[in-house]
Image: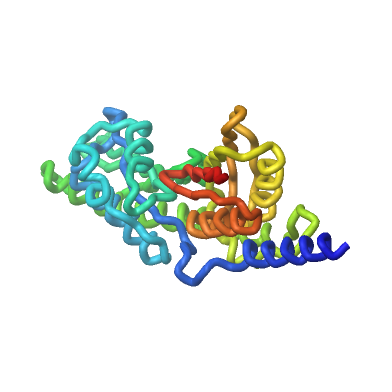
Amino acid sequence: MLTKTLSAMAGLAFAALALAPAPASAQTKPNIVVMGEDADQDSVPRGNRIFNRVITELSETMNLRGYSVYDETAVAMGITQPGRVRRRDAELIDVARAVQQPPLDVVVVFQIYASAQKSSYSDIVRPEVRVAGRLLNVRTGQGLGSFEVAGQQLPPLPQGCDRACLLEKVGAEAKTLAADLSSALTAKLDGFIAAGGRADAGAVTDVPSQAPAAGGDACGGLPTAYVLRLTGFSPTELQAIEEYAAAFSCYGSHRPVRASGSQAEYWYESRSDSARLNRNLRLMLEHMGAEGQVTFSGNTFSVTKVATR
């Protein structure tokens, strides 16, 4: 009886630690990179004056809304050739995933279409501009929202408007549309994060040592997918690890990916940031009384049991 009581008390203490709010320094909002998709030959290419005004406006609006927005060239110039044009979305996502410092959470992919149409009845020329964008979770590929804005009855171009004039007039309209697009996408992202916080409020663990989960503010983040790779654990220990992982705060779901006699892998979805999950995994090993190591790279946590005599 005494042994069971002590075990229950230890389990409750571990749950309280694992479910405690993250330190103040932990990530509260996702890191964002804004990237232009210009593979379509009809779209405005990267480096164009219109393109530059749009990407600047998108980045600045999201920055003012409290998000950490990183310049693609600055964070990726060491691993990819800067200045490439006509890039497909697959290349953009691959670059965003390859950047490790800082870790990027959300990529904003946008496209610009601009043209000038002459009236069928006179020599009046009107510009037409359309800017579309979407939000993608870098790690999972999940779409977080999309929006499109287009100019309505734009003012006609002045007579004799040359290429420089056209770029300035269209660029000014595109900048205005970019501000509207950025506000819409940011509102979608805010709502996505807020919904996660509300869903976590008042949750309880699924293991016998129940304890209230952290409040909505502690779990207000994007759902992130991690790979948990467990090596050297017995079937009984793996079962215990699954229970612990499901009891961690901000837990979403998990499913086995592969398993063998010496290794098991799980796809683990959570709104917890990597720092908190790393801390919880170390606390888990300590509570289990197992010697082990926890390493993290990309979105993979490797937990290896160290065998001793």
**Percent x, y for residue 12?**
74, 65
Outermost residue, bottom side: 24
- The number of numbered discs placed on residues in the rendered structure image is 0
Residue 261 vs residue 12, the one in the foreground = 261
Name the image quarter holding residue 88: top left
> Toward which corner of the image does residue 191 lie, by quadrant?
bottom right
The reply, left or right, for residue 8 in relation to residue 185 is right
Q: Is residue 233 above or below residue 282?
A: above
Seen at 83% across and 60% down, the residue is: 4
The quarter in which the N terminus is drawn is bottom right
User: Could you tell whether 94 is left or right of 125 in the image?
Assistant: right
Report whether residue 136 is seen: no
**Front residue of 221 and 21:** 21
Q: Position of residue 142 (x, y in %)?
A: 52, 40
Q: Residue at x 59, y 59 (%)?
A: 283
* Above or below, 19 relative to 108: below
Query: Nearest the camera: 56 or 251?
Result: 251
* 226 vs 271, nearest the viewer: 226
From this viewpoint, is residue 88 visible?
yes
Image check: 275 left or right of 240? left
Outermost residue, right direction? 1
- Tell me what residue is drawn at x 27 percent, y 55 percent: 56
Q: Position of residue 121 (x, y in %)?
A: 28, 34
Q: Position of residue 64 (x, y in %)?
A: 37, 66
Q: If the image is split into quadrants, where does the C terminus sit?
A: top right
